[in-house]
Image: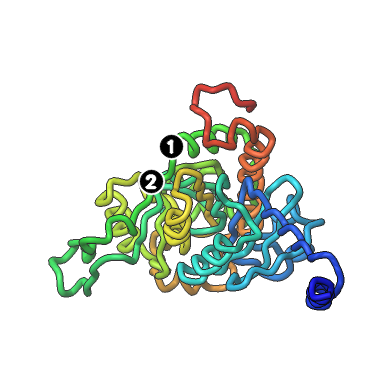
């Protein structure tokens, strides 16, 4: 009787039912490529395109938005493992979103290639409106010591790097990966506009007057919208001081994003892709203030065309990586290996 009572008591405690087995957790999405844009002007499709819209229209029209706590905008993923989001403008905004997304257990970034995508400015001696540039180096423009020019020898640099911050201020991207990106970008059709063509003719530099093309070089990350020939020269000197390639694009996020990604996954799978929508200084005879606050009809054209160029060039790389995933899963194949082109 005592044994029967014990059995009955056990059944009461368990509800007389079989023990419940926890439902298996959903496997995280294996992300092959993550595309990070910084801003969108309006909607993700159907209106004037910002940085995210060309990517959204190519990869995520049928993909539901997934909210990530701490990120500015939702994440979208397609069945092929291409995911992306709009992170926000500036170092803090973008890196906070990137960190939140990387820490979300819904996604597996262990083998992900990151494409940091957006618009920027270019020095007229190095590029032109409509150019699309792959970064070889990412350099932080802000991190250092600066002082007023009148407190220095006339014409001398007013910038000095801050000791002890070497690992934060520059990132060399994998040359093999960048090389593949450039190789796949060759021959991509580049859009242009009559307004941009007319605007270029205000400049004397041969590069400024050229048609859009695919470039490589250093992307200079600064929360400060540095502008004018003096600060452009300073940016170029910082690139050289750090042992990087020529500065070709000014932007606001990539170095900070590279640091966030590096702390979890390294920098071996990062690409930075930027399109030039303005020059970082005025034309001859134009003051910096006039260039920053132009009269009606004096603005650079070509924004829509540049954004389209970014999407065309970048999607070539994304599509190749996904199509050849068995070759790319464990890292970029050697340059001589016979990947499809």
Q: Residue at x 30, y 63 (%)?
A: 230
Disc 2 to disc 1: CB gap under 8 Å: yes
Rendering coords of residue 332 (x, y %): 52, 34
Badge number at residue 333 = none
| Mark 1 neighbour density, 10 Å: few (under 14) some (14–19) many (20 or more) | some
Q: Which mark is residue 175?
A: 1
320 and 332: which one is in front? 332
| Residue 259: quarter of image | bottom left
> In the image shown, does 329 or 227 lie closer to the viewer?
329
Taking depth in this image into account, of 199 and 136 the one nearest to the observer is 136
Residue 122 in sight in this render? no
Question: Which residue is rendered at x = 47% and y = 62% of the image?
Answer: 253
Q: Position of residue 33 (x, y in %)?
A: 62, 47
Q: Residue 215: x, y in percent?
A: 49, 42
The residue under label 2 is: 172
| Residue 88 position by quadrant | bottom right
Q: Residue placed farthest to the right in the image?
A: 16
Question: What is the secondary structure assignment of the residue under circle 1?
Answer: helix
What scheme was used to colour the molecule? rainbow
For the residues labelled 2 and 1, the Cα–Cα distance comes to 8 Å
> SS class of the residue under badge 2?
strand
278 vs 24, left or right, is left
Q: How many marks?
A: 2
Q: Is residue 245 above or below residue 19?
A: above
Q: Residue at x 52, y 53 (%)?
A: 200
Q: Is residue 267 left or right of residue 337?
A: left
Would residue 218 appear left or right of 110 to someone viewing this image? left
Instruction: Find residue 295 and report its horizontal and vertical position in percent.
Output: 53, 73
Residue 126 visible in the current orientation: yes
Question: Residue 69 sits in which quadrant?
Answer: bottom right
């Amino acid at each position: 009787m005592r044994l029967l009572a014990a059995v009955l008591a056990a059944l009461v405690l368990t509800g007389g039912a079989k023990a419940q087995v926890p439902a298996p957790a959903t496997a995280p999405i294996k992300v092959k490529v993550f595309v990070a844009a910084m801003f969108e002007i309006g909607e993700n499709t159907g209106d004037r395109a910002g940085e995210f819209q060309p990517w959204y229209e190519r990869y995520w029209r049928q993909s539901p938005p997934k909210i990530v706590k701490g990120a500015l905008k939702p994440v979208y993923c397609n069945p092929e493992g291409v995911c992306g989001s709009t992170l926000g403008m500036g170092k803090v905004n973008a890196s906070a979103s990137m960190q939140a997304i990387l820490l979300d257990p819904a996604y597996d970034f262990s083998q992900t290639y990151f494409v940091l995508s957006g618009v920027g400015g270019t020095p007229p001696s190095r590029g032109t409106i409509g150019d699309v540039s792959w970064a070889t180096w990412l350099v932080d423009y802000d991190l250092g010591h600066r002082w007023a020019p009148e407190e220095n020898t006339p014409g001398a640099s007013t910038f000095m790097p801050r000791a002890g911050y070497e690992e934060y201020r520059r990132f060399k991207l994998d040359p093999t990966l960048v090389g593949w990106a450039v190789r796949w970008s060759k021959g991509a059709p580049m859009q242009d506009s009559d307004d941009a063509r007319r605007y270029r003719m205000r400049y004397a530099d041969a590069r400024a007057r050229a048609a859009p093309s695919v470039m490589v070089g250093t992307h200079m990350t600064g929360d400060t919208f540095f502008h004018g020939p003096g600060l452009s020269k300073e940016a170029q000197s910082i690139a050289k001081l750090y042992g990087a390639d020529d500065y070709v694009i000014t932007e606001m996020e990539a170095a900070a994003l590279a640091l966030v990604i590096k702390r979890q996954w390294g920098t071996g799978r990062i690409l930075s892709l930027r399109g030039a929508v303005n020059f970082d200084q005025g034309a001859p005879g134009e003051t910096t203030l006039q260039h920053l606050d132009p009269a009606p009809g004096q603005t650079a054209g070509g924004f829509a065309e540049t954004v389209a160029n970014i999407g065309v060039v970048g999607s070539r790389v994304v599509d190749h990586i996904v199509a050849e995933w068995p070759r790319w899963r464990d890292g970029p194949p050697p340059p001589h290996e016979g990947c499809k082109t």
